[in-house]
Image (tube, rainbow, N blue to C red):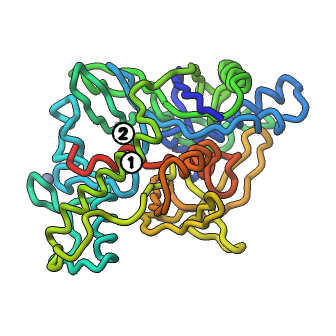
Amino acid sequence: MKPVWLKICPEEPLVLGSLRPDAQFLASRTYIPGRLLRGAWAEWLQMQGVKNILGHVQRLRIGNFFPAVEEGELLYALPFPLTAMTCKHHPGFWSEFLKKHQGHGIVDTLIPHLAYHLLEQAGARMRAPFALTCAQCNGRMEPEEGFYGVYQYGRKIGFVQFRPRFHAQTKVALSRFRRASHFQMLYTVNALAPQAPAVMSKDGNKPVVFLGRAYGDPQAVEELRQALSHVAIGALHTRGYGRVKVEATTLPGWPGLKERVKTFNRLLVALWQDLKRLAANGGELPDQPDGLYFSVDLLAPGVFVNNGLPELVPELHINGKTLRPVWWATRPEMASGWSTAWGLPKPTNLAARMGSVYIYRWDGSLDELFPALQTLEAEGLGLRRDEGFGEVLVCHPFHQEVEER
Ligand SMILES: [Zn+2]
């Protein structure tokens, strides 16, 4: 199944599956979970009197959609991996287009960490523990979260963090039965605005767009697109929130899978050689690590089970071999869900957070491995994949940013 890239352009503020809905406050996520799109599609089918709604929507696996400001040439948008770090005192990319947004840079620590770990395993006696400080001020680093977009402007490539703008409104809850306001039932909606401050021009606002992928037959993609031109997405979607337009798009600047795996390994060898010089016994160590390595990065929370028990670290089964990760960075969260179409809560599972990253070693050629990696991206990993859990990217391009961007 080849992925189809889609671009979602909001026309109204969005309330995207609040993390903790309660009676007084409704907040929005800043990305569009694929399952909200599926829910809206199911709702549209139900309104059309279609039977076997599940059979219809299961023809597509809809990934998550990540936000960016649309200005100039936007190449792609992604969540940061959990291994991204920035200067504690001057956070942010230094390659931002606007001076007011520039910080000391954001760097990915995965490949340096991995090189250090593999060197130790190969018997290196490192003279210093693994530590990272800001290249500009020597200050402490802290993890960076959220989403970023990569832009081309002439010959310059700029990295831009997504800075959401919210649109808050206090509403009076209406009684469902009497259409009258409930006694003391005011609540605040904090919706994601369809525009955000420009990232290249000095003033003004630009549209926010969301980029993501759907896997399945093109006819089903077209049906989804049509449905979303009739039904708004997210919470409160009948009350002035959640109208979107969906377009098929191409991302010529998106690095291909094979290229990402090759660059990942080239950088790993370079970092290995760099760090080897810090080992007391560097002369006794090989010139490069054994094996081929690749990362699996979660673009959505992942629900994994091993022997019936929930776990945060998934195994891969490739060409009859079981691979356990050699290194990982993950954090837990609870995966819950709500069926928009049926109004029923879904079961709650322990999940690994979006941005979690797992490194696997492959003892063979890239050509042998490649089809399995393609399938992994197309099908996802773990349980509840048809709800959008377990969407993965192999060798997230941000791992290449081993120097501050
Ligand atoms: Zn700094």
Q: Which residue is mark 1?
A: 80
Location of residue 102 in the rendering, given as x and y in whole percent from the top left corner: 18, 38
Task: Name above or below for residue 372 compared with residue 65.
Answer: below
Q: Secondary structure at mark 2?
A: strand
The answer, for residue 186, to whether it is visible in the render is no
Q: Can you give x and y, in whole percent of width and height, for residue 132 in the image?
A: 20, 63
Expressed as whole percent of the image width and height from the top left, the position of residue 405 reads 22, 43
Report x, y in % for residue 222.
69, 21
Total marks shown come to: 2
Q: Height in image: 184 above or below 158?
A: below
The furthest residue to the left: 137
Which residue is at a point 24% across and 73% down the rendered structure image? 285
In the rendered image, which quarter contains the N terminus?
top right
Left or right relative to 47: residue 239: left
In this view, the residue in front, 333 or 251, is: 251
Left or right: residue 234 compared with residue 344: left
Nearer-the-camera pick, 401 or 373:
373
Residue tagged 2? 148
- Looking at the image, which residue is at 52% across and 21% down? 249
Mark 1 touches mark 2? (CB < 8 Å): yes
The residue carrying pointer 2 sits among few (fewer than 14), some (14 to 19) or many (20 or more) residues within 10 Å by Cα, namely: many
Q: Is residue 71 above or below residue 326?
A: above
Instruction: Give 40 or 365, whichever is nearer the viewer.
Output: 365
Q: CA distance from mark 1 to mark 2?
A: 7 Å
Residue at disc 1, secondary structure: loop
User: At label 1, which amino acid type do we have?
Assistant: Phe
Q: Amino acid at mark 2?
A: Tyr
